[in-house]
């Protein structure tokens, strides 16, 4: 039994975009004598839609994969069981990931990048106390001046993790795809990317962010 399909109204620019997508899908998935209808285009867009609450997962994986040693060391200072020194960068990254999980780990790195973590305030605390002491001890000005200088040095060394800009983060994330280009490829179907896993199986995903997440998790 055929059902009457409801109609939708689109603008001229929306119609042109749908036709462009239709042509791209036909080139990618349809043989010489095949054809894609407008309803197929809409279904494809619905199938590949990523809800807003899930769109940040790829960013979290990128942030974890590209965090430098200084940032990892700062996060490790607040995590029991993860040493802040004596291990290399990748080992520390893996231990933090196991201890915190992807979401919490990414949140802490984001707070560090935005300057909202507690390390900055703790570094500035002793400086304020030393300044108060210097007003009381008039007969030891040189000692007080030296004490004031030390927190400034700590602040300068602590600012190292924030030198990486958004461009370098994106570049490093794309490098992950290049380094493991033999492990993923574009395929067909509703989930157009395929990733080879270490156990010999292949997983299909919808976006390159998902590809990066799998590569980071398994390789």
Image (cartoon, rainbow, N blue to C red):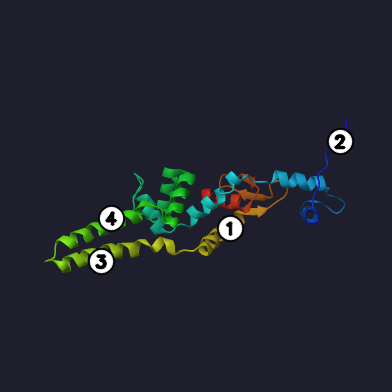
Q: Which residue is mark 3?
A: 149
N-term mark: 2 or 1: 2
Q: Position of residue 135 (x, y in %)?
A: 18, 62
N-term mark: 1 or 3: 3
* Left or right for 25, reference 99: right
Q: Secondary structure at mark 1?
A: helix
Label placed on residue 4? 2
Q: Secondary structure at mark 4?
A: helix
**CA–CA distance between discs 3 and 2?**
78 Å
Q: Secondary structure at mark 3?
A: helix
* Left or right for 130, reference 219: left
Label placed on residue 125? 4
Query: Where is residue 170, by image quadrant?
Result: bottom right
Location of the N terminus (image quadrant): top right
* Left or right for 97, reference 50: left
Label placed on residue 134? none
Label placed on residue 177? 1
**CA–CA distance between discs 1 and 4?**
43 Å
């Amino acid at each position: 039994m055929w059902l009457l399909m409801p109609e939708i109204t689109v603008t001229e620019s929306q119609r042109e975009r749908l036709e462009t997508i239709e042509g791209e899908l036909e080139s990618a998935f349809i043989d010489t004598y095949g054809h894609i209808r407008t309803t197929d285009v809409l279904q494809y867009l619905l199938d590949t839609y990523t809800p807003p609450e899930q769109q940040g997962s790829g960013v979290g994986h990128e942030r974890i994969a590209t965090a430098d040693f200084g940032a990892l060391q700062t996060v490790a200072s607040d995590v029991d069981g993860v040493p802040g020194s004596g291990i290399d960068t990748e080992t520390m990254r893996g231990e933090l990931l196991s201890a915190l999980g992807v979401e919490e780990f990414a949140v802490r790195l984001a707070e560090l990048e935005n300057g909202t973590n507690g390390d900055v305030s703790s570094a500035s605390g002793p400086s304020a106390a030393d300044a108060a002491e210097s007003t009381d001890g008039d007969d030891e000005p040189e000692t007080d001046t030296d004490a004031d200088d030390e927190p400034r040095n700590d602040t300068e060394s602590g600012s190292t993790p924030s030198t990486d800009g958004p461009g370098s983060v994106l570049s490093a994330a794309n490098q992950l795809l290049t380094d493991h280009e033999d492990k993923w490829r574009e395929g067909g179907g509703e989930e157009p990317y395929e990733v080879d896993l270490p156990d010999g199986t292949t997983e299909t995903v919808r976006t390159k962010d998902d590809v990066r997440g799998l590569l980071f998790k398994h390789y």
